[in-house]
Image (cartoon, grey):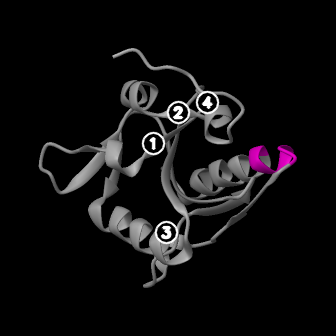
Amino acid sequence: MSKAKGSRLERELINKFFQEENFIALRAAGSGSTPLPCPDLLVGGNGRVLAIECKGGKGSRYIKKTQIEELLQFSKRFGAEPWVGARFDNNPWFFIQIENLKQSKTGNNFVVDLKYAKSKGITFDELIGKYKQQKLE
């Protein structure tokens, strides 16, 4: 995914949070280019703080283990819930808890695709607490 598309998707998600009365979000520009742990988005509202690593595009998206380790480190120190947000072309956002991420075949990275995001992730409305959907096993 290009930097421009990634930035556009992050701004799209910021706007979704802003449209909700009790949430506000900010984007950490160049979050992947700093030597310090930093999520793509930091979100607050309804007594919660979320640190979100965003992925988007077509097909499978790979996330380096170091990115997840840094997200966890940041979240712990900041007091935030770590999440991976994924939006695949022509689909809504899905949010996956770190413990539900799937390792790649090599085990060096994590991988998220649309089918996996739908089965293990939650929707935006579920994330912000509008409702909770029961998943079938």
| Mark closest to the chain's N terminus, 1 or 3 | 3
| Local secondary structure at mark 4 | loop
The residue stretch that appears in magenta: 16-21
- Magenta stretch, main secondary structure, is helix
> Are the residues tagged 2 and 4 within 8 Å (C-beta)?
no
> Are the residues tagged 1 and 4 within 8 Å (C-beta)?
no
Report, in whole angstroms, how far the alpha carbon at label 2 lies from the one at label 1: 7 Å
| Mark closest to the chain's N terminus, 3 or 4 | 3
- Res. 92 mark: 4
Q: Indicate left or right for 127 with 72 as reference.
A: right
The residue indicated by pointer 2 is 122
Look at label 3 and name its amino acid: Ser
Q: Is residue 64 above or below residue 115?
A: below
- Res. 75 mark: 3
Report, in whole angstroms, how far the alpha carbon at label 1 lies from the one at label 3: 15 Å
> Are the residues tagged 2 and 1 within 8 Å (C-beta)?
yes
Residue at the image position 14 percent from the left and 42 percent from the top? 105
- Res. 3 mark: none
Report the number of numbered marks.
4
| Local secondary structure at mark 2 | strand
Report, in whole angstroms, how far the alpha carbon at label 2 lies from the one at label 3: 19 Å
Q: Is residue 72 above or below residue 54?
A: below
> Are the residues tagged 1 and 3 within 8 Å (C-beta)?
no
User: Does residue 17 show up magenta in the picture?
Assistant: yes
Residue at the image position 37 percent from the left and 65 percent from the top? 67
> Are the residues tagged 2 and 3 within 8 Å (C-beta)?
no
The residue indicated by pointer 1 is 96
- Discs 2/4, front: 2
Label 3, residues with CA under 10 Å away: few <14, some 14-19, many ≥20: many
